[in-house]
Image (cartoon, helix red, strand yellow):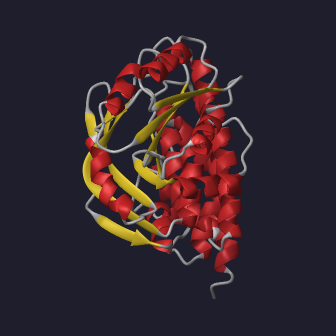
Amino acid sequence: MAPIISVIIPLYNKEQDLPRCIESILSYTRHPIEIIIIDDDSTDKSWNLAQTYCQQDPRVRALKHQYNKGTYATRETGIRAASGQYIFCVDPDDWINNKSFDAAIPYIKKNIDIIVTECVFLYPYHKKYYKHEDQFLKNEEILNAYTSLRIELWNMIPKFIKTELALHALNELNINKYLTMSEDLLLFLTICIFAKTWCSIKIKAYYYWIKGEDSATTGKKKMDKILQYIEQTKYILCCLEEIFEKYGHPADQLIPIKMALFNFYRNQMETSELDDKSQTIIIKHMFDCVGILNAYKSMLTYGVNTDFTSSIRMLNQLLPAGSIRRKIIKTITKKIWSFCRFLNSFKN
């Protein structure tokens, strides 16, 4: 019998975590499913372990990249190989409550495009629950809910998504680039452009394990890693702006997401214990990445009640405290002040 759900697991050097992930899925037997493991050229024993699971259970399939392609390409390989009506993405260091499969079946039978479940974020010292009420959205309500931040979690998890819809998004994007950060944002928001129906169900389906950063990582490596992620995010935002405009959605609709990404990288920087020079370099890249001055201009243009004073207040909220904040604000205040005067000349 053809599977209803294809579970997609991108794999790279996770031999210690994979058993917990796989076994949380394999214990499900009520409806036909398949598990597709895509090894992104791991250097540990992850591939051997994946093959072992293939031998033990016919529902498991394992594919292998000949070289490391990144998370986006690895997930794409799995989606294109899926034979189920719906995909459900799982990272190899996470695990699931497989009762969520049964909870999703009634909505799958109703042909809902995207079925969202609840998620538990497991940090080293605490938990955070991503909860929501049962609700239903359709057409442009779906994309608007995410771009306005009314609904959070832009990841491909924890969601059941029609396979044909995911394939449509992949074909439209046609990405051939190494991506390991924010790649979920790119694919999922593109899926939302084409989705007609969306629902959420109250069941804790997904357990997202967040490990602490290696304390041995040096400041230079931390900075390089953050800068690499920022550059990938910049590329992803450019791709999203293009596809938004192609399908009649203004690129400015992405402004709340850009601000959220700015805050994310600011938090990453603040917890990395970098020196002032490194923080200044990162902040400059962050401003360039999210086009923060352009976003500010768009808020003014679209009638947001913003003047020079409130612009500085906004920067105070976005930037970390201390000398870095003072230095950045002093540098760009002249630009914002000049633009405010220019725009105000048209208001009278």
Tell me if residue 211 comes above or below residue 198 in the rendering: above
Find residue 300 and report its image quarter. Answer: bottom right
Tell me if residue 158 comes above or below residue 56 in the rendering: below
Residue occupying image coordinates x 65% and y 37%: 73
Find residue 255 and report its image quarter. Answer: bottom right
Estimate the x, y position of residue 337 in percent, counting from the top left.
Answer: 64, 64
Question: Toward the viewer: 232 or 279?
Answer: 232
Q: Quadrant of the N terminus?
A: top left
Tell me if residue 145 comes above or below residue 325 in the rendering: below
Residue occupying image coordinates x 71% and y 61%: 242
Residue 320 seen anywhere in this rendered image of the structure? no
Estimate the x, y position of residue 288 in percent, counting from the top left.
Answer: 68, 48
Question: Toward the viewer: 3 or 79?
Answer: 3
Residue occupying image coordinates x 65% and y 51%: 170
Residue 56 seen anywhere in this rendered image of the structure? yes
Is 27 on the left-hand or right-hand side of 191? left
Estimate the x, y position of residue 336 in percent, counting from the top left.
Answer: 64, 61
